[in-house]
Every structure is written in C-alpha cells, then in structure tokens.
Amino acid sequence: MFKQIPIHKNEGQSDIIPLFAGEERCKKSHAFGPHIRSHYLLHFCLSGKGVLRDKHGEHAVGAGELFIIRPDEVTRYEADKDDPWHYAWFAFRGNITVRFDPLPSVLKTPEGIAERLCALIEANIEGPDLYCAFAYELSHALSLDCESTDTLARVHRYVRYHYMEEISVDNIAAVFGFERSYLYRIFKQRYGTGLKEHITAVRMRHAKELLAQGMRVSETARIVGYADEFNFSRAYKKYYNKSPKADRCK
C-alpha cells in the first residue's frame, strides 16, 4: 500500500510550509536512496522495523520511533528483510525547521502524534492548516521530550551523589517535578533499568567496595543508605546471591 497527499501551499505562512504527507506498508528489504532532498522529511514507524543511514552512521528504527531526514544530506533507508516497516511521512519547509536541527536522527515518537498524521492522510486532507497545527504540536512535544531527557541525566547524577541518603523513587520524582510512574517509564527507556533498580545497583557496588576494605556490615549498611542492617543484608544477598559477610575482607 502506498498513499501520498500533496498539500496545498499557503503562501502567507513562513513558519511552516507543509509539502506532502503519505503512508506505506513496505515490502521486505524495500529501500530508498541514496538521495538528497531540499526539504525536511520525517518518517514515523508505525510497525515493523528498518535501518536509516545518514552522515551520522547507521540507525536501527522500530515501531514507535521516528527518523529525521534533513535537506542537503545524503540518506538511505531500508525496510527489514523479515519484519518490514509500515510508516507514515511528512515533508515541510519553513522557519520551524530550526527547532529540528539540533535533534538526533532517530527519536521516540511523542504519544498520539503518529495517529494524528495518519488520520489526516486517511481523510485525504490537502489544506495546509491542519498540517501546520500538526507540525507545531510535534515540535512542541519533541522539545519537551528533549528537556525531559536532559533532566534524566540530572536524575542519574543525583542518585550517584545521594545514594547514601534515604532516597526513593517517590522523593526523587518530587525533587524533579515528575509524576512517579512517568519518571519510571522514561528513566527505563533511557537507561534500560528502572530507577529503583538503579538506586540499588549503585548502593550495592559501593557496599561491595567497602566490604572488600574490611568495613563491618553494620557500618556499610549505614554508609550506603540503609537504616536497617537486616534490610541491607537481604538486599545484598538478593543482588549478589551471597551474604555481605561473605564479601567482607577480614
């Protein structure tokens, strides 16, 4: 299936000039390029997967992600040979493109964005207004996601500097102004592990080092943020599959 909608231009609009949008269920190993474009082109992977190649290298792209093709850059993209992607695309010019310049080649698609674009395509919308609104919404959502990503690096550092205190996911979420479940989700997406598990891992690594230096279990527990020695010993045994006493250098 291949469908592309030409978008009627609004000459009075300079911030965003939508050009065309489309959707395709690609065949296995279907490829496009190498090619150079004079406009921005965003692809939203709805299902399946594939690979983008640009000046920054090779990028795997899967469902729920989008990739950015910038003007005057050589790009090539190819559907997976076993699970080819189904994607939608949106091409545009205008002053708004400066907001996309610093972004990486592949990004997580903000919630609801791809569905909004597909709805416009399926309805055969050719007027520019709804596509302009879509572009502004996307730009805003991506800027918020980038701010969240920067804040996640601060969260990561916060754990490194405060692991010896009685910190938890709840109070870290409060410190950084996140809702608890949202912080858990985006932290795991970024680092591949939950925030609670990350706190435990940092504490356990430091505990192992202290025990190897001969520190008593009770002192080690207190230093790495456990008020209760029993809870520390239980956590240590769960993490390393042995008691902290077994690792203490005598």
Image (cartoon, rainbow, N blue to C red):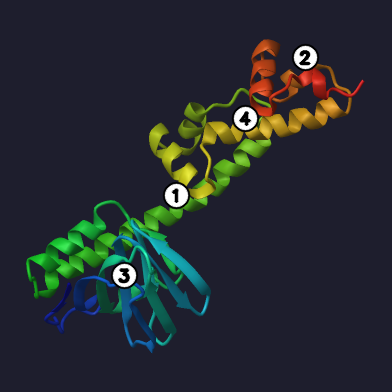
Q: Relative to 3, is 207 on the left or the right?
A: right
Q: Is residue 27 visible?
A: yes
Give the structural element (helix, strand or loop) at label 2: helix
Residue 156 at x, y percent in the picture: 58, 43
Q: Indicate which label's residue lies in the foreground, 3 or 2.
A: 3
Q: State the separation of the CA atoms marked 1 and 3.
A: 22 Å
Residue pictured at 7% horizontal, 71% vertical: 124
| Disc 1 + disc 3, Cβ < 8 Å | no
State the residue position of label 3: 43
Give the structural element (helix, strand or loop) at label 1: helix
Give the structural element (helix, strand or loop) at label 4: helix
Q: Please, is residue 240 above or below residue 130 in the view?
A: above
The quadrant of the rendering that contains the N terminus is: bottom left
Residue 53 at x, y percent in the picture: 46, 76
Residue pictured at 82% horizontal, 28% vertical: 210
State the residue position of label 4: 200
Q: Relative to 195, is 238 on the left or the right?
A: right
Q: Which amino acid does label 3 sit on?
A: His
Q: State the separation of the CA atoms marked 3 and 2.
A: 55 Å
The crowd level at tag 4 (other Cα within 10 Å; few <14, some 14-19, many 20+) is some
Which of disc 2 and disc 4 is earlier in sequence? 4
Residue 89 picture quarter: bottom left
State the residue position of label 1: 148
Say which of 95 and 116 sits in front.
116
Residue pictured at 62% horizontal, 30% vertical: 200
Q: State the separation of the CA atoms marked 1 and 2.
A: 38 Å
